[in-house]
Image (tube, helix red, strand yellow):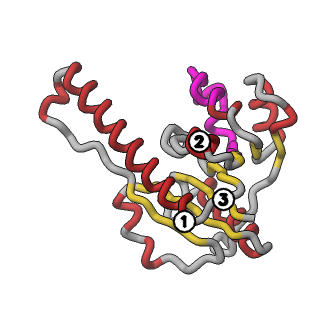
Amino acid sequence: MKILFISTETRPVRGGIAFALDGWLSGLAESGHDVHILALLPKEKLTAINQLPKRTYKEHWYELPKRPVFFGDKFILFRKIFSWHFLYKRKKSITKAFKKLVVKNIPDWMIIGCINEISCIPVPIAKMRKIKCAAITHGSEVHPNRVHNPSWLIKQLNQMNLLIAVSSYTKNLLIDWRIKNELITVVHPALSNDVL
């Protein structure tokens, strides 16, 4: 099976999500699946990729555009216009990177490794191309103390073919948001050898 992961939390970022994702990707690749990841990272994180040990899955690095400081930022109207323009350019560039990767290697599944506005940009394109979509919910992005207006997130989660919750607690948080129980599967995170 061909699987494409998309994440902003992946090697060389260090942390729970990146370690868990690395374990899942390695496990799936070692089980014989054709696994790719589109890693969306800021420029300062990409400088470390040459020192990383090779993996059994294929990594495609993409530099996230960074919003430059603009002299008109002190004026609200200019700041809003400049921010809207920047977000539009970022969305367009991520969409281009996604389409380029999908044209080369059409996946059976696209899995969002870290749910946020950046990682979810390709979901509508994947749905149009009849690619099944899944998302891994780690807990923090659905926790009521961290998310106060979850309407965009609920909309994204309801578009998925599958939701992978890292714990029963996270599954219950999703159910509290009226996400269908049959969409949610609990899969506990795996650790990569680098952690041990």
Q: Secondary structure at mark 3?
A: loop
Please check the rendered image and state whether residue 147 is part of the magenta-colored stretch, yes or no.
yes
Residue 140, given in percent of the width and then of the height, sits at 63, 38
Residue 116, given in percent of the width and then of the height, sits at 54, 40
Q: Are marks 1 and 3 in contact (CB under 8 Å)?
A: no
Left/right placement of residue 165 relative to residue 130 reads: right
- Can you say whether 55 is above or below 154 in the image? below
Residue at x 65%, y 77% (from the top left corner): 56
Q: Which residue is mark 1?
A: 104
Disc with the residue nearer the chain's start (2 vs 3): 3
- Can you say whether 162 is above or below 82 in the image? below
Cα gap from disc 1 to disc 2, whole angstroms: 18 Å
Amino acid type at image mark 2: Val
Q: Which residue is mark 2?
A: 123
Front: mark 1 or 2: 1
Q: Which residue is mark 3?
A: 107
Left/right placement of residue 138 relative to residue 48 reads: right
Amino acid type at image mark 3: Pro
Quarter placement of the C terminus: bottom right
